[in-house]
Image (cartoon, rainbow, N blue to C red):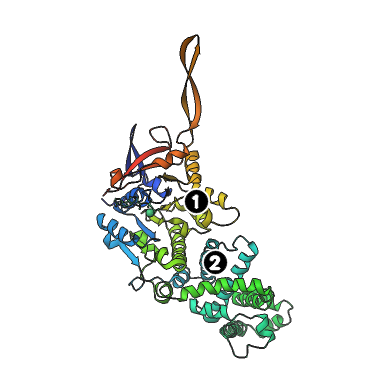
């Protein structure tokens, strides 16, 4: 039954516990879920499947990112089972659904300057996530700043010159920014896209200045011309003049004077990324046509599935899904829960592929925007490797702390099992040890003492059931809910998931 009113205390799932049924609510869902378990441990077909069916049945909207080729089919089946087929929007190569991210980011805010800031933010987050995953340089603050400045100045130049941005324009300009060697050899005889944009930008600003000056009286004009700070004053009155000054300074000084190696690395990161956006199928899906859907559709109950599985489309599939995920996350954060309380889910099986630097910050506020994140991954090292950088352990643990519910399935990874065991914590156990003495006569006594021990020892996770016919389709898992005490007096519960669960 789909809900029409969404109360956070509505029970989504009842888990049988030894002190009666434990109820897991919408509030728990929007505090986020992390599922860990080794390969074939039942993450997807056990706990994942049950959560997906419950979220769909309750009427959640959502975004599904894909890694494996069969995920689309699995979700089509989930939607059929819950009567949600009509809500499913599949974004696939050659399909009818397209989304133009530059157009979307430019239109979401009428201010030209803010739309530039938005676009810079999206591009740099995705480029950095992509660098991070390939073991890149994103821990180097210098590199980050230089890349941000390049992106930002190219976008500013494009907006000043043409009043709009497209991936093609950005790519062409990025390809032809002034370089010392080109200038010294006099190679640039004809006007390249950068020069053309620059001339158009200057024309635009000149026109604005002329229009402003024509509205002045003779006396005011003279006062301006004789003023030493004429330039500054103009820049205050005409913001585009200031932007043009910065753009000019950046390309003729700061960027030009970077060492050849640094400059080419930065250049290459940006151009390389734009180039990947210009290739099919990404170009047609995310850059070429108007949007047929937007992230906001999820607030009306739509489920957007990006069918560009990473296993098949590799880096391009991952980058474009991170891009959409990031745009989607920011849109969902802006929503007004008091006008529309429908929870939306962000679903990522094999989630390590889609992490980016903004995730922890976003996750911290996801609850108040009613975003029910479900991240599924084999183990902690997966996240450590993909959230690169020197401080990755700290980053990963603090990120996991922002996901309220964790489910641990069978796992042979020592680190994940230790983490799970520590999280569940310690308990008091009776320690029964027997002493036997045989000095002349036999005597046996039993002593009882209280001992503190891990409630679930790390090695216990190795033995959990993993589904399939040999286990009668049962998958075991430990559920841990942060901060809320269950009826059994603990934060955790051992649960059986049924792979044949049909809602
Ligand atoms: N619908 C199903 N019915 C019965 N058994 C299944 C079903 N789907 C998967 N299995 C089996 O159940 C086990 C768990 O599979 P599942 O795909 O859920 O694991 P997983 O934890 O998601 O693994 P991976 O990390 O490889 O994605 C496997 O042995 C699999 O062969
Ligand atoms: Mg799986």
Q: Which mark is residue 124?
A: 2
Mark 1 closeness class: few <14, some 14–19, many ≥20 residues within 10 Å:
some
Q: x, y (%) of residue 305?
A: 36, 63
Q: Quadrant of residue 494?
A: top left
Where residue 158 appears, as percent x and y from the top left, is 54, 78
Indicate whether 307 appears above or below 220: above
Q: Residue at x 70, y 78 (%)?
A: 230
Q: Height in image: 362 above or below 162?
A: above
Residue 364 got which mark?
1
Judging depth in this view, the residue of 361 and 143 nearest the camera is: 143
Q: Position of residue 441 (x, y in %)?
A: 48, 9
Q: Is residue 332 left or right of residue 258?
A: left
Residue 210, position as x, y percentages in the image = 61, 85
Total numbered badges shown on the rendered structure: 2
| Mark 1 touches mark 2? (CB < 8 Å) | no
In the depicted view, which residue is nearer to us: 333 or 120?
120
- Please tell me which of labels 1 and 2 falls first in the chain: 2
Does residue 144 sit above or below 405 in this rendering?
below
Q: Judging from the image, what secondary structure is the residue with disc 1 in?
A: helix
Residue at image point 49% right, 79% down: 168
Instruction: Identify the secondary structure beneath mark 2.
Output: helix
Ligand 2 contact, mark 2 (Cβ < 8 Å): no
Give the residue furthest to the bottom: 189
Calculate the distance from the C-alpha at mark 1 to the C-alpha at mark 2: 21 Å
**Can see residue 228?**
yes
């Amino acid at each position: 039954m789909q809900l029409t009113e969404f109360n956070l205390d509505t029970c989504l799932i009842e888990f049988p516990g030894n002190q009666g049924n434990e109820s897991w609510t919408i509030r728990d869902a929007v505090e986020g879920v992390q599922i860990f378990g080794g390969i074939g441990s039942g993450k997807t077909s056990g706990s994942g499947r049950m959560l997906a069916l419950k979220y769909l049945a309750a009427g959640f909207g959502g975004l599904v990112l894909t890694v494996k080729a069969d995920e689309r089919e699995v979700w089509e089946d989930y939607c059929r089972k819950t009567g949600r087929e009509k809500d499913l929007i599949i974004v696939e190569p050659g399909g009818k659904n397209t989304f133009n991210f530059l157009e979307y980011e430019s239109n979401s805010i009428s201010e030209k300057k803010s739309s530039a800031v938005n676009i810079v933010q999206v591009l740099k987050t995705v480029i950095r996530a992509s660098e991070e995953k390939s073991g890149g340089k994103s821990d180097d603050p210098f590199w980050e700043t230089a890349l941000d400045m390049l992106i930002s100045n190219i976008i500013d130049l494009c907006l000043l010159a043409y009043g709009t941005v497209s991936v093609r324009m950005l790519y062409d300009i990025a390809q032809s920014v002034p370089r010392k060697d080109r200038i010294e050899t006099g190679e640039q005889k004809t006007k390249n896209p950068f020069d053309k944009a620059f001339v158009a930008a200057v024309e635009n600003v000149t026109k604005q200045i002329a229009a402003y000056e024509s509205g002045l009286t003779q006396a005011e004009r003279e006062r301006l011309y004789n003023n030493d700070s004429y330039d500054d004053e103009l820049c205050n009155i005409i913001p585009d003049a200031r932007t043009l000054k910065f753009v000019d300074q950046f390309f003729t000084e700061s960027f030009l004077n970077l060492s050849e190696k640094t400059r080419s690395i930065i250049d290459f990161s940006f151009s390389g990324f734009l180039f990947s956006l210009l290739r099919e199928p990404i170009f047609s899906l995310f850059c070429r046509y108007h949007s047929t859907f937007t992230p906001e559709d999820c607030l009306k109950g739509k489920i957007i599935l990006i069918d560009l599985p990473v296993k098949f489309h590799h880096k391009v599939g991952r980058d474009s899904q991170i891009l959409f995920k990031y745009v989607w996350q920011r849109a969902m954060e802006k929503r007004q829960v008091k006008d529309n309380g429908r929870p939306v889910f962000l679903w990522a099986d094999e989630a390590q592929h889609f992490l980016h630097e903004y995730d922890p910050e976003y996750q911290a506020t996801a609850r108040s925007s009613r975003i029910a994140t479900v991240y599924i991954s084999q183990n902690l090292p997966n996240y450590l490797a993909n959230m690169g950088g020197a401080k990755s352990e700290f980053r990963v643990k603090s990120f996991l702390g922002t996901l309220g519910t964790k489910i641990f399935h069978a796992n042979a990874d020592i680190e994940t099992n230790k983490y799970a065991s520590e999280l569940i914590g310690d308990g008091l156990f009776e320690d029964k040890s027997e002493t036997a003495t045989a000095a002349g006569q036999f005597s046996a006594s039993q002593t009882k003492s209280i001992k503190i021990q891990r409630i679930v020892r790390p090695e216990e996770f190795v033995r959990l059931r993993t589904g399939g016919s040999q286990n009668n389709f049962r998958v075991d898992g430990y559920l841990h809910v942060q901060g809320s005490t269950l009826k059994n007096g603990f934060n955790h519960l051992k649960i059986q998931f049924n792979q044949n669960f049909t809602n």
